[in-house]
Image: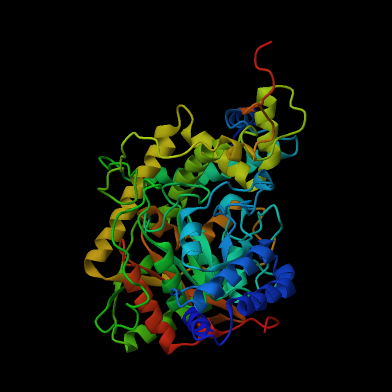
Amino acid sequence: MSLAELAAGLRERRFSSVELTEHYLARIDAHGGTLNAFITVAHDSALRSARAADAELAAGRAGRLTGVPFAHKDIFCTEGLRTTCGSRMLDQFVSPYDATVVAKLKAAGTVLLGKTNMDEFAMGSSSETSFYGAVKNPWNTQLVPGGSSGGSAAAVAARLVPAATATDTGGSIRQPAALCGVSGLKPTYGRVSRYGMIAFASSLDQGGVIAASAADAALMLCAMAGFDPRDSTSVDTPVPDYAALLGRPIAGLRVGIVKEFFDAGLDRENARRVEEALAVYTRLGAKLMEVSLPNLALSVPTYYVVAPAECSSNLARYDGVRFGHRCSEPRDLQDLYRRSRGEGFGAEVKRRIMTGTYVLSAGYYDAYYLKAQQVRQLIAKDFRDAFVKVDMLMGPTTPTPAFAIGAKMGDPITMYLNDIYTIGANLAGLPAISIPCGFVGALPVGLQLVGPHFAEAALLNAAHAYQRESDWHRQMPQGFA
Amino acid sequence: MTLTRVAIESIAQLARLELNEEEIPVYQDSLSRILDFVGELERAATNDVTPMAHPLAGLAQRLRADVVTEEDAHERYQENAPQVAAGLYLVPKVLE
């Protein structure tokens, strides 16, 4: 059932929020272990929220999402409920406050079922770097679900939750959504508040949602988006009713097909699924034309300067003094810092902190960081130029379907190249969505739509138009019925 | 480029990260490869290109009035601290 149908069922009293919550908690208990999709399951507080929602429903005070269960990626701070960010560093951390997104979804009457597993501090493309172990792909549990929001994507794909929040710094919503056959929306930078969303790379991080369909993502975004004075990068622009704006015809929509997305690295079958999806758009009246993003090949190297630089600065706060892991019996203050951080962070996080420290260090700043910020400008300009000619861009979300657990852990560069088609949107701050567009063998792959700043409504509408013509988003992995 | 063992130790010290013996060669290898990879940026022509500091071009950082908006909640915040006494965070002795 869609989120809208769940909400309607609750309002019409066909089932209660407590019943719905128990249903999903039972699914999490039955399958959560197989997938390792959750770090924390909040049985008691979920049922308390569900009872409160049922009271609101009975009193006729229900909103659009009242009583609807969902999960948060464990990067969003939840007051009174452990928030780990997938790290030993925060294994015992209980946030004293709610992230703005958490507070907004709470105010909307939703029921939080738990916190989903993820790459440590959102640094990864496979959800293998979590301190709590690798997340499994529900379509084949030998494979990764993608990352870093792999727990959210796997949980939605197996319908352990109807929807889950997620975050995207270089593809961490869209790539796992593609590899798990679900819909993942990364909004425009500044659209969703970052307050209380644990920082990785502040000029790239953006909160969003993973759901079974674009229509569900639209409903969630309505509740999550909006100006927040507590986030200095939050943008004060009205939030359209994304859900009400679905269903508009897309005849005449100008779609740019990014030449560079169909490069040698793209799996041929994956390319075919994308081309078949594009044919559906043509049938619906969209006008497809080729466009070029000439600097796209530089997006991954640019990202791997900018993101580690910001990460090394953001993660300096974990010092073993105010919160987080502290080593035992430190000899002195230096030893306390060095061992607390050495023990608290995993291998990939340390790699990125050190990369960032290096590129920002004296003598290297201009050659790496400044240069990367200049190339970032060129990449953003490529997108701006493209959006003069077209309304949105389309192409694959990932180069290949899901890969085996362990396959790329020894080679960071190969792992980083998973995000070749997604990183550009982060560098330019653009909204983008991945929706399922078919299978390669038994594995789902995604179609990516990228729009100009604040074009979420157009992207969701175009994604929804495709989902009315296809049923890829309704496919379920075997064993989770 | 190949980073030396000394270079890795120096980066780790700047980042305040204790590395064990096994980690050092691993990071020597992977950081060297990452720096080679990002070295591709050298090829890009960026003369007169303004570095991009904010993804939404033209938007200035918002400022707010310098007024107190938060209540004092140090006790609540310190519940997460490894070691606290008398409302203070404890660290090893800095001065002998």
Q: Tell me where residue A104 appears, x and y as whole percent.
A: 46, 60
Q: Is residue A107 visible?
A: yes
Q: Is residue A236 left or right of residue B35?
A: left
Task: Give the quarter of the figure containing the C terminus of chain B.
Answer: top right
Q: Residue at x 59, y 80 (%)?
A: A16
Residue A401 in view here: no
Which residue of the protein is positioned furthest toward the right in this rendering? A329
x 70%, y 65%: residue: A36
Height in image: A268 above or below A261? below
Front residue of A473/A386: it is: A473
Q: Is residue A98 above or below residue A20?
A: above
Q: Residue furthest front?
A: A59
Question: Percent x, y for residue B18?
Answer: 69, 32
Taking A170 as reference, is B33 left or right? right
In the figure, A69 relative to B14: above or below? below
Total marks shown come to: 0
Left or right for A387, reference A456:
left
Q: Position of residue A181 (x, y in %)?
A: 55, 76
